[in-house]
Amino acid sequence: MMVARAGHVNSLVAAVLAAASVSCGPSRDSGDGDGNTGPDACTGLECQVQNCAANGQPPTTLTGVVYAPNGTLPLVGADIYIPRDPLPGIPDQLTCGACSAGLPGSPVTYTKSDATGSFTLTNVPVGANIPLVISIGKWRRELTLSNVPACTNTALVADDTRLPRTQSEGHIPRIALTTGEYDSLECLLRKLGIADSEITSSGQPGRVHLYQGNGVAQFAPGFGISGGQTLFSAQGLWNSPAALANYDILLLSCEGSQESDLSPKSQQQLVNMKQYADLGGRVFASHWHN
């Protein structure tokens, strides 16, 4: 469980963007630079990797910077790779990620973003319609590059290398956020670049659901598809392990006290929250959450 004082934005970013699985390396050999997975064999896109060094040329590379959905906040530790195979869907149910699972899609070539968010992906397959995956935890964006020229670098623009703002751009983990009298964590989600259309109440199609702790009780009029709607009580989350398990991440705004009048916490509710974290849930508990 991650616990931090309100205002530690870097901790919040880590909690939100590294959601619900461990970021790991590829689960197979990435090849020998010639596109081969064995002595004489290659499959699919592996066969489009050119041995540029044989002609005294630099390798085929892609470079860029991975950003949060807002396109300005660089992210360390994101996975960037070319998949050989189609990617499976990402389950919505709570999962405990393990590095032994590797990355889906049998990466042909793979790298991670550094402390500045920058990356260089080498030995990239050459040609038209090359797939590219950028992921961190359950955040995933899939791109198709119209053309990758051989033995040169292709620099990708920020709008292509940021995480998705909406479900139409890629996969966003399911997030529950409770409002609190002493925090406005819902504002930080908007600053991270998540679209207003994805911030809704429970039961609506957005990937972020707001619940009332002892903070605001409804959406502002005209806000997205939930304008003016009253929030469901956060007690419904604390009371139910099944309800908690619907989310990859919980963001708990500061309520000032564990014994808040609107949202008191019983021992069983605290046990439920611990069990959620033990099962792989990510919890950002702001300041006075004990």
Image: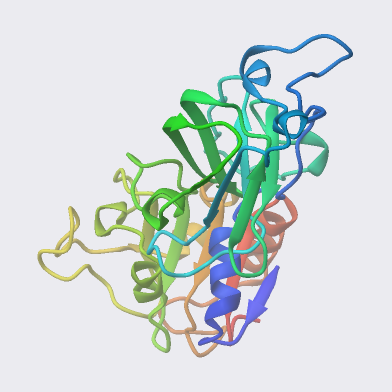
How far across and down, in percent of the image, does residue 177 sit?
Answer: 44, 65
How far across and down, in percent of the image, does residue 163 sit?
Answer: 45, 52
| x 52%, y 80%: residue | 9
Residue sitting nearer the eye, 38 or 178: 38
Quadrant in which residue 145 is drawn: top left
Q: Residue furthest left?
A: 222
| x 61%, y 49%: residue | 137
Whether residue 193 is visible to the viewer of this picture, yes or no, is yes
Residue 140 lies, with reference to residue 255, above or below; the image says: above
Residue 192 lies, with reference to residue 4, above or below; the image says: above
| x 62%, y 55%: residue | 119
Residue sitting nearer the eye, 167 or 276: 167
Q: Quadrant of the C terminus?
A: bottom right
Instruction: Tell me how the rendering is colored.
Output: rainbow
Quadrant in which residue 108 is drawn: top right
Query: For this view, does 178 lie left or right of residue 248?
Result: left
Residue sitting nearer the eye, 139 or 132: 132
Query: For this view, does 86 lie left or right of residue 46?
Result: left
| x 78%, y 43%: residue | 98
Q: Quadrant of the N terminus?
A: bottom right
How far across and down, in percent of the image, does residue 217 sit?
Answer: 27, 73
Query: For this view, does 152 lie left or right of residue 72?
Result: right
Q: Residue furthest top?
A: 40
Q: Residue furthest right?
A: 39
Whether residue 239 is visible to the viewer of this picture, yes or no, is no
Residue sitting nearer the eye, 102 or 271: 102
